[in-house]
Amino acid sequence: FESWHGIYCVMLDQTGSFWLATSEGVLVLDLAPRYFRTLLRQSPSTSENRVSSRTLLRRDDTLWVASQNGLHRVNLRDGEATRVFTQSIYSLHRHRPGEFWLGGHYLVRLLVGRQPPRAFDLSHPHVWAMAKDPRGWLWLGTEHGLTRFDIRQDRELGFSGYGRFGELASAKITAFQPDPDGTWWVCASSGLYRFDPRRQLLLDRYHADGDPTHRLPFD
């Protein structure tokens, strides 16, 4: 797979297959029979139209792919792909069937096939990551820290409770990963953080160049 570059997202499904969002499209790997499959990949002669994928979301036989070329819906039974949104997006949240929140330069609500998308300006541009907490708020990872968005009232709530982790306010946040204990792992340019969305509280920092108590395994 030497020609595949820039792996931005890895998803493991219930069958043990790995789904990789890359700068060349989507690669599906089944390691047991050593089988692989490609989706949304263009030939080298059409590289300017290449689907540089950022986020994957699978529901039954449908794969949703957020990419620099927009949002794509892929039928996994026949591989047919349809682009349902044309602007560049980096993150994706499915609120309910047919309703998505998209993160790019703006935050966008998309009701597929029902009405035009609606964009919301935020205090900081570029929504690299998003996740919904138990209250129903969307937490957004932006170019400059965290912010919250109330999807019931369509308004940004902001966030300033960084406490002793003030460096996160100016960091690029690229991913949220839920933990079984209810906390989230927050991946940022300033390190890896543990966050409690219920209390809106940052708990710990694991930094490559900082506190030796919390050193990452790959340091």
Image (spheres, helix red, strand yellow):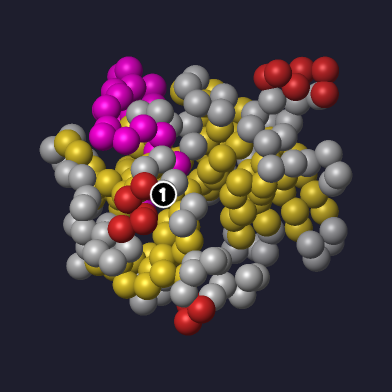
Quarter of the picture holding the C terminus = bottom right
Judged by its main secondary structure, the magenta piece is: strand
**Percent of width and height locating residue 142:** 38, 42
In the figure, is residue 206 to the left or right of 150? Answer: right
Between 176 and 125, the one nearer to me in the picture: 125
Q: Is residue 100 above or below residue 210?
A: above
Instruction: Specify whether residue 29 is painted magenta.
Output: no
In the rendered image, is residue 150 in sight?
no
- Crowdedness near tag 1: few (<14), some (14–19) or many (≥20) residues, C-alpha within 10 Å: some
Q: Is residue 100 above or below residue 50?
A: below
Q: Secondary structure at mark 1?
A: loop
The residue sitting at the bottom extreme is 213
Callout count: 1
In the rendered image, is residue 8 in sight?
yes
In the figure, is residue 138 to the left or right of 3? Answer: left
**Percent of width and height locating residue 94:** 38, 43
Q: Amino acid at mark 1?
A: Ala
Q: Which residues are magenta?
A: 108-131
Residue visible at 67% across and 47% down?
Answer: 7
Q: Mark 1 — residue?
A: 171
Q: Is residue 48 above or below residue 61?
A: above
Instruction: Specify whether residue 112 is painted magenta.
Output: yes
**Percent of width and height locating residue 125:** 36, 32
**Percent of width and height locating residue 138:** 28, 47
Residue visible at 41% across and 34% down?
Answer: 126
Instruction: Write down the quadrant of residue 152 in the picture.
Output: top left
In the figure, is residue 33 to the left or right of 199? Answer: right
